[in-house]
Amino acid sequence: MTVVSLLKALHEGEIKTDMDVYANFATSEEVGLRGAGPAAFGIDPHVAIAFEGTIGSDFPGVPEDKRPCAQRKGPVITIADKSVLVPRRMVDLMTDCAKQTGVPYQYKMPIYGGTNAGSIHMSRAGILAGCIATPCRYIHSPNTTLYWPDFENTLKLAKRVVERAHELA
C-alpha cells in the first residue's frame, strides 16, 4: 500500500523528483528473497528503497531482546538484518527525513530475517539499498494488524526519502 500511495503522490505532483522512479511488486521474499534481485538486475537503479511490514512483537510474553520494533513508535528504518547491512549514508538520510517531517521513527537490527533490500544490494556491482517498514503484529498470518498512524507516518517518511533520494545517487 505504501508503494501504491507513493506512485499516486508522484502522479499527482505531490512528490517532486528529477529522478526516474520505478516500482517493483516483488514476490518470494519469504522464500529466499527471490523476486527483488532479478527485478533490480533488470531495472539497474542508482538507489533502491524496499518497503515492507515488519514484526512488531511488543506484547506480553515476548522478551525485550526479541522485539525488533514496536507499534505506536513510528516507521522502522532498517540498519541491519541477516540479509543486509544498510550503508550509513542511507540510514542517515532516512533519519534526517524523519526528523524534517516530524515523524517518529525507530531502528531495526535483528540478527534474523531479511528484506528485499538484501537481494537488491547484491545485484549487479552492488546497488545502494535501504528499507523502511511499518510495524505489524501477527505478520504472515491471516490477520496481520497495524496501527494506522504508524502507516501514515511511514508514508510521510517514504515521500520525503523519495524526494531526497537524488542526494544518494
Image (cartoon, helix red, strand yellow):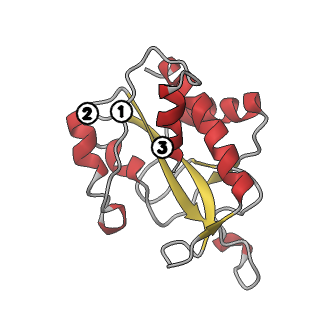
- Residue named by callout 2: 43
Residue type for callout 1: Tyr
Which dot, 2 or 3, sits closer to the camera?
3
Q: Is residue 37 left or right of residue 53?
A: left
| Res. 22 mark | 1
Dot 2 or dot 3, earlier in sequence: 3
Q: CA distance from mark 1 to mark 2?
A: 8 Å
- Residue named by callout 3: 3
Q: CA distance from mark 2 to mark 3?
A: 16 Å
Please give the name of the residue rendered at 37% of the width and 22% of the height, measured from the top-left corner. Answer: 20
Q: Is residue 50 left or right of residue 127?
A: right
Say few, some or many: other residues with alpha carbon within 10 Å of mark 1 (under 14 / 14 to 19 / 20 or more): few
Q: Nearer the viewer, residue 168 or 35?
A: 35
Please give the name of the residue rendered at 52% of the width and 51% of the height, measured from the top-left corner. Answer: 80
Dot 3 or dot 1, earlier in sequence: 3
Q: Nearer the viewer, residue 135 or 21?
A: 21
Q: Tell me where residue 36 appears, x and y as whole percent.
A: 30, 49
Considering every residue shown, the one lying at the far top of the view is 18
Q: Is residue 125 left or right of residue 114?
A: left
Q: Tell me where residue 112 appears, x and y as whole percent.
A: 48, 67
Residue 71, by quadrant, is: bottom right
Residue type for callout 3: Val
Query: Pointer 1 and pointer 2: residues touching (CB < 8 Å)?
Result: yes
Residue 22, by quadrant, is: top left
